[in-house]
């Protein structure tokens, strides 16, 4: 603001400089027609808003009223998703000049993903959350369901071709359009998901008859059944003890989450089948969204793009680093050389889950 006053004073003092040089219209400027003014006014207003926003950001000025948004994360902050959350939080607070604060509650202190979703959809005091894309499946997310179908994404580039496409926005806004009360802001990923077990597993055959933990999700249940194992619903917060006491024989997680949650201590066998890519998204309740000014809503979207790009940069390197650490620490890591038998075993659930959106699912497959 101080710079603006100095600039104006200098302009007034310099007779050789036209008033237009100080951002003022010259008195003898030709009059524009009403039609021209109507066309140019919105552009001028928009430009003024962008300039104001840029100046506020540079000066650290607050954009809009103060608001604190409570954000839930089931994993620790040192995981890929935890780091992505932190990048998003910091960028939001930076761009808003501190008017928007993100109260990031990690390590599952606000409950499992389903607990968090129940709270958000029920009008509770959680405003935002980072969730697995398939978590919305049980809440009417028919499009999100397609992202968790086993063996959909052949590699990371395939997923990011989707996540940066126009189709991604359609998926993100589905819950809001269906009246669920939440909307997605951006996508990311936490690496491919693999099975880990208490007993050594070297092939698909070794999984048969095992009790494998799943969330309460129809696709996960169908996949585990297709692989010849028994799906057992256990909350994420109870999984460690369930593995320790024999309630379940194994589970599945992305590599980084497997290590960060200390699962190798009780299930030190990891088979890299890569059944699904851990697609994630950050969602916000409609109630919290509507409390924000349009400028603040824009800040969340801009910060979301930043966090998504950040996630893409760190995910693969972080996963590879953790995998090498696991091997060095004595984890029994088994590579799957031929994924075909795994895909064939899951064919029934793949067809069942995609039949209602077959054309849309094919669009995703074609992005590889």
Image: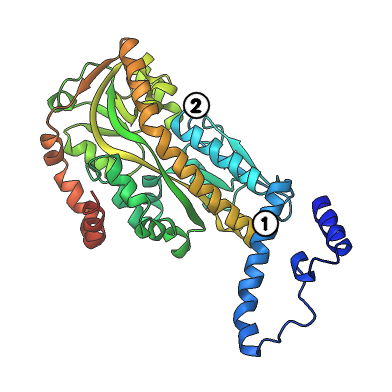
Q: Nearer the viewer, residue 161 or 8?
A: 8
- Residues at marks 1 and 2, CA–CA distance in whole angstroms: 32 Å
Residue 338 spot, x, y in % from top left: 12, 31
Can you tell which mark lies on residue 330? none
Find residue 190 and report its image quarter: top left
Q: Residue at x 64, y 61 (%)?
A: 50
Q: Residue at x 80, y 80 (%)?
A: 27
Q: Residue at x 58, y 35 (%)?
A: 105
Find residue 156 and report its image quarter: top left
Location of mark 2 (residue): 78
In this rendering, which labeled residue sits more in front, label 1 or label 2?
1
Q: Secondary structure at mark 1?
A: helix
Residue 160 spot, x, y in % from top left: 34, 46
Within 10 Å of disc 2 (Cα), the crowding (few <14, some 14-19, many 20+) is: some
Give the total of numbered labels. 2
Residue 330 spot, x, y in % from top left: 31, 10
Location of mark 1 (residue): 53
Side (left or right) of 228 relative to 329? left
Q: Nearer the viewer, residue 15 or 361?
A: 15
Q: Nearer the viewer, residue 304 or 13?
A: 13
Find residue 293 and report its image quarter: bottom right
Q: Earlier in the sequence, mark 1 or mark 2?
A: 1
Within 10 Å of disc 1 (Cα), the crowding (few <14, some 14-19, many 20+) is: some
Residue 253 seen in this snapshot: yes
Residue 148 seen in this snapshot: no
Q: Secondary structure at mark 2?
A: loop
Q: Is residue 308 above or below residue 75?
A: below
């Amino acid at each position: 603001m101080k710079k603006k006053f100095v600039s104006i004073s200098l302009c007034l003092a310099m007779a050789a400089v036209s008033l237009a040089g100080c951002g003022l219209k010259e008195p003898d400027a030709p009059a524009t027609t009403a039609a021209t003014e109507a066309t140019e006014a919105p552009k001028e207003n928009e430009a003024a808003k962008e300039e104001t926003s840029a100046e506020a950001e540079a000066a650290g000025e607050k954009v809009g009223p103060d608001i604190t948004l409570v954000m839930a994360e089931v994993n620790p902050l040192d995981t890929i998703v935890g780091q992505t959350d932190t990048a998003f939080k910091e960028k939001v607070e930076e761009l808003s000049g501190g008017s928007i604060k993100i109260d990031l509650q990690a390590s599952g202190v606000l409950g499992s993903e389903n607990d968090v979703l129940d709270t958000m959809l029920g009008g509770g005091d959680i405003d935002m959350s980072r969730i697995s894309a398939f978590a919305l499946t049980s809440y009417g997310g028919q499009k999100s369901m397609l992202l968790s179908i086993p063996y959909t994404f052949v590699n990371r580039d395939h997923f990011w071709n989707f996540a940066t496409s126009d189709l991604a926005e359609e998926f993100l806004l589905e819950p809001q359009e269906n009246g669920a009360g939440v909307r997605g802001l951006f996508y990311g990923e936490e690496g491919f998901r693999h099975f880990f077990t208490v007993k050594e597993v070297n092939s698909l055959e070794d999984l048969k008859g095992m009790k494998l933990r799943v969330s309460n999700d129809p696709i996960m249940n169908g996949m585990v059944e297709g692989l010849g194992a028994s799906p057992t619903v256990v909350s994420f917060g109870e999984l460690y003890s369930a593995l320790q006491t024999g309630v379940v024989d194994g589970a599945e997680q992305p590599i980084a989450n497997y290590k960060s949650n200390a699962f190798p201590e009780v299930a030190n066998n990891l088979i890299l089948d890569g059944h699904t890519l851990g697609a994630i998204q950050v969602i916000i309740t409609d109630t919290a969204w509507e409390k924000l000014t349009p400028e603040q809503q824009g800040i969340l979207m801009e910060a979301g793009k930043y966090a998504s790009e950040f996630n893409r940069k760190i995910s693969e390197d972080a996963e590879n680093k953790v995998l090498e650490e696991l091997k060095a620490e004595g984890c029994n890591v088994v590579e799957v050389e031929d994924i075909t038998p795994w895909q064939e075993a899951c064919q029934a659930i793949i067809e069942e889950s995609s039949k209602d959106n077959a054309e849309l699912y094919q669009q995703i497959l074609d992005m590889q």
